[in-house]
Amino acid sequence: QVQLVESGGGLVQPGGSLRLSCANSGSSGSSFAVYRMGWYRQGPGKQRELVADITTADTTNYADSVKGRFTISRDNGNNTMYLEMNSLQPEDTAVYYCNARHIFGFEIWGQGTQVTVSS
C-alpha cells in the first residue's frame, strides 16, 4: 500500500526558495513509475488547485502562476517526487499536497505540508 508523506515545507521570506519532497512511507506498493504524480495546494479561504504534475512519461504541466518559478521532478527508483520552488511570493502560501494517480485510475493523497511566505 502506497502512503504518501510530504516534507520540506516551512516559513520563507519573499524571494526565497524551498524544496518539497513526497515519498512513499508505506511498507509496500507499486513504484511511482505507474503513477501520474502531482502537487496541489490550498491557500487560506481558497479551493485546492493543481500546481504541477508529471506523467509516467515525465511530461510536466504547470499552473500559469508558477511557470518559470517551480520545477517538478520524480525519482522512480527511490519512489520520491520533488517540487523545487523559487522566487516564492506571499500568494504561494498554502498547504501543499502530494497526489498520485495510478494508471488504473485510483488516487492517493498525502497529508500536506505548510508553506508560508512572509517577511
Image (cartoon, grey):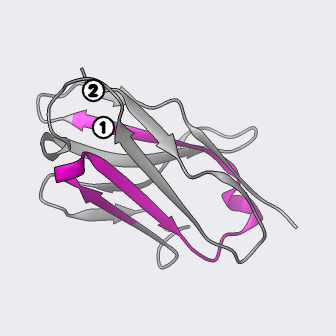
Q: Residue 25, image x and y in percent?
A: 36, 31
Q: Secondary structure at mark 1?
A: strand
* Residue 89: x %, y % from top left: 72, 69
Q: CA distance from mark 1 to mark 2?
A: 9 Å
Considering the whole magenta stretch, tell me its main secondary structure. strand
Residue 63 in sight in this render: no
Q: Amino acid at mark 2?
A: Val
Neighbour class for label 1 at 10 Å: few (<14), some, many (≥20)? Answer: many
109 is within the stretch colored magenta = no
Residue 5 to residue 22: above or below? above
**Which residue reaches farthest front?**
27
Query: Which residue occupies 48% across, 45% down?
Result: 40
Residue at the far top: name it: 1
User: What's the residue at 36%, 48% (across, down)?
Assistant: 38
Q: Amino acid at mark 1?
A: Ala
Residue under the point 30% across and 37% down: 100
Q: Is residue 83 magenta?
A: yes
Extent of the magenta region: 72-101
Q: Nearer the viewer, residue 77 or 73?
A: 77
Residue 95 image offset from top left, x and y in percent: 63, 42
Tell me the residue that label 2 is attached to: 2
Instruction: Choose between 81 and 88: the one closer to the eye.
Output: 81
Q: Quadrant of the C terminus?
A: bottom right
Mark number, residue 100: 1
The reply to whether discs 1 and 2 touch (Cβ–Cβ < 8 Å) is yes
Numbered disc 2: secondary structure: loop
Q: Identify which residue is drawn at 12% across, 35% down.
A: 103
- Whichever of callouts 1 and 2 sits on the residue coming sooner in the sequence is 2
